[in-house]
Image: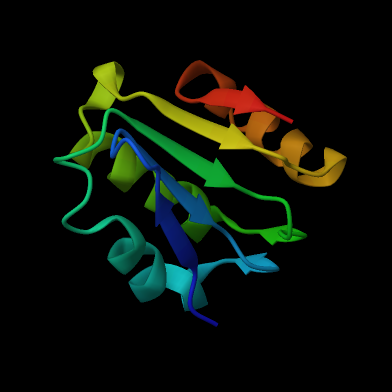
Amino acid sequence: MALKNEISADGNTLTVFIGIRFDITTYSDFGEAYKGKIDTVSSIFIDMTDCIYVDSSALGMLLIMRERFGGDNANIFITNMSPNVTKIFLTANFDKLFKIKS
């Protein structure tokens, strides 16, 4: 399933909506969701409202996106996570790399 993305009306924010599974099968779709857009936005929101499954490849994809978006200066928010998905992100210390909003 292709991921959805949306640019805010002012053009400053990209939101990527993750589907039910965020794993290696979403690799191409995830890259396409932000490809060519990260140079024009100041913030990225990863909306996990529908996501119930995350694996290590998804964490890797987020790290790649973070590096492409400016590394330590990247303004990336991961939002609307279920308690189980939040636990994975906190265990991996992703709260130190991303702005987590459950």
Residue found at the very far front of the displayed protein: 9
Residue found at the very far right of the displayed protein: 83
Question: Which residue is depicted at the point 44% across and 59% down?
Answer: 5
Question: Which residue is depicted at the point 81% across and 44% down?
Answer: 82
Q: Can you say whether 49 is above or below 89 in the image? A: below
Question: Which residue is depicted at the point 63% across and 67% down?
Answer: 19
Q: Is residue 50 left or right of residue 64?
A: right
Question: Which residue is depicted at the point 17% across and 40% down?
Answer: 40
Q: Is residue 74 left or right of residue 80?
A: left
Quadrant of the rendering where the C terminus is positioned: top right
Quadrant of the rendering where the N terminus is positioned: bottom right
Q: Can you say whether 100 is above or below 15 in the image? A: above
Residue 32 percent location from the top left of the image: 29, 67
Q: Is residue 58 left or right of residue 27?
A: right
Q: Can you say whether 19 is above or below 10 in the image? A: below
Residue 30 percent location from the top left of the image: 40, 64
**Quadrant housing residue 78:** top right
Residue 51 percent location from the top left of the image: 71, 59
